[in-house]
Amino acid sequence: MAELATIARPYAEALFKAIAPNDAAAVSEQVNALAAVAGNEQVRQFADNPKVPPQQVFELITAAAKATFGEGAKNLLRTVIDNGRLAALPEIAAQFHALVNARSGVSDAMVLSAFPIDAAQLQQVVASLEKRFGRKLKASVAVDPSLIGGIRVAVGDEVLDTSVKARLEQMKAVLSA
């Protein structure tokens, strides 16, 4: 949805410029908590009700997020509510997270594995992936038994698929051609 991305960009950039570099990780977590609540359809319907004052929407979201918020996150939330852009908050959080990662030189990596990966194995996998992608990676792991074996890694728009499922699909394409 390009429109939400266009709406979210100025908010994410403004927040990024307004916070101290050493507060970026904490603010990112706070904004993610707010975005999770704002992503709820019932919360957005409540916020869109013209009879509900903005302060009440603010209090509902901060209470539902169950976290302590700094001034940067509170000001962002107030501004988003006042401008009627609550639906853009999840995209704002994603863009803010990307800006924080770009500043620190880290990329998010999603590792899908056919079997659970323990901490030592994950460290080895991340080390080899960092060499392969040429940058520092923050990996999150999910188990996907449909891969049969191996792993599938997504870093941004780059994908490295060494799973058995992918190899079987390649063999099927070659044999059916």
Image (cartoon, rainbow, N blue to C red):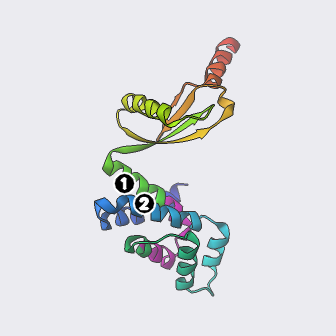
Q: Is residue 7 visible?
A: no
Q: Which residue is mark 1?
A: 100
- Residue 169, relative to residue 115: is it above or below? above
Asked if the stretch drawn in magenta spans residue 81, the answer is yes
Front residue (pair 66, 163): 66
The crowd level at tag 2 (other Cα within 10 Å; few <14, some 14-19, many 20+) is: many
Q: Is residue 145 left or right of residue 110?
A: right
Q: Main secondary structure of the magenta part?
A: helix
Residue 141: percent from left, percent from top: 55, 40
Q: Is residue 70 left or right of residue 61?
A: left
Q: Quadrant of residue 26?
A: bottom left
Residue 56: percent from left, percent from top: 56, 84
Asked if the stretch drawn in magenta spans residue 74, the answer is no
The crowd level at tag 1 (other Cα within 10 Å; few <14, some 14-19, many 20+) is: some
For badge 2, the amino acid type reads Ser
Labels 1 & 2 near each other (Cβ < 8 A): yes
- Residue 65, relative to residue 169: is it above or below? below
Q: Residue at x 66, y 67 (%)?
A: 41
Q: Start and end of the magenta stretch? A: 76-91
Q: Secondary structure at mark 1?
A: helix
Q: Which residue is mark 2?
A: 28
